[in-house]
Image: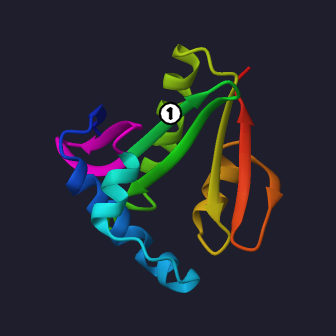
Amino acid sequence: MNMCYQPTADLMASALLTYTNMRGYYEHYGVDWQQLKICEQISDLENWDVLLNGDVVGAMRLAFDDEGCYIRDLQVDAAFQNMGIGAAVINEGARLAVLQGAMQLRLRVFKISPAHKLYTRSGFNIDKADDRFYYMSKSLV
C-alpha cells in the first residue's frame, strides 16, 4: 500500500468527501450541514489529503491548542475503508502532533459511528460522552 500525505489541494472536494461520508449521521441527528458550510469550517484548520497510489482517498484535519492536537476530521472514502488506511492516518496525525510539541491527541466521534472502534484499537480512551458523541483522547508521551 503506497500511502502519502499532502496539504489539501482542493478544500471543496475535501469538504464533499466529509459531507458524503457524514450525511447519514447529520440526517440521523437533524444537523443541517452542507458542503459549502463544511468548507467554511475547515478553512482555518491544518488540512491534509490522504493519497493511495497517487489518488486522494481521504482527508485529515488537525487543530492545535494548549492541550495538544485535536483531530477535527478523519475521513476515508467508503470504497477504501477497512483496509488499514484510517489507522495509518491516525499514526500520521500523531507524528505531526509530536512534531509540533503536542502531548495528547483528542477527537470526538458520533456514538453511532463504527469509527469509535478504530479509535479504541488505536489507543484512544473515552473521556466523556453525551447524547451524540464520545470524546476521546490518547497520550503521545
Q: Residue at x 29, y 41 (%)?
A: 49
Task: Residue 65 in the image: state x and y as whole percent.
Answer: 61, 28
Residue 27 vertical position relative to residue 139 in the rendered view, above or below: below
Which residue corresponds to mark 1?
93
Q: Quadrant of residue 33?
A: bottom left
Q: Main secondary structure of the magenta part?
A: strand
Q: Closest to the observer: 103 or 120? A: 103
What is the three-letter code of the residue carrying label 1? Answer: Gly
Q: Is residue 53 magenta?
A: yes
Q: Residue at x 61, y 55 (%)?
A: 118
Q: Is residue 17 magenta?
A: no
Q: Residue at x 35, y 38 (%)?
A: 47
Quarter of the N terminus within the rendering: top left
Task: Residue 56 in the image: state x and y as whole percent.
Answer: 22, 48
> How many circles with numbers are drawn on the protein?
1
Residue 124 can be seen, yes or no: no
Task: Residue 9 in the image: state x and y as whole percent.
Answer: 19, 39
Q: Closest to the observer: 122 or 128? A: 128
Q: Quadrant of residue 8?
A: top left
Residue 133 vertical position relative to residue 94 in the rendered view, above or below: below
Which residue is most to the right?
128
Residue 45 vertical position relative to residue 21 in the rendered view, above or below: above
Q: From the viewer's perspective, tell me whether residue 18 is left or right of residue 26.
A: left
Task: Residue 135 in the image: state x and y as whole percent.
Answer: 73, 54
Residue 115 vertical position relative to residue 94 in the rendered view, above or below: below
Quarter of the C terminus within the rendering: top right
**SS of the residue under disc 1:** helix
Q: Magenta stretch?
A: 43-59
Colour scheme of the rendered structure: rainbow
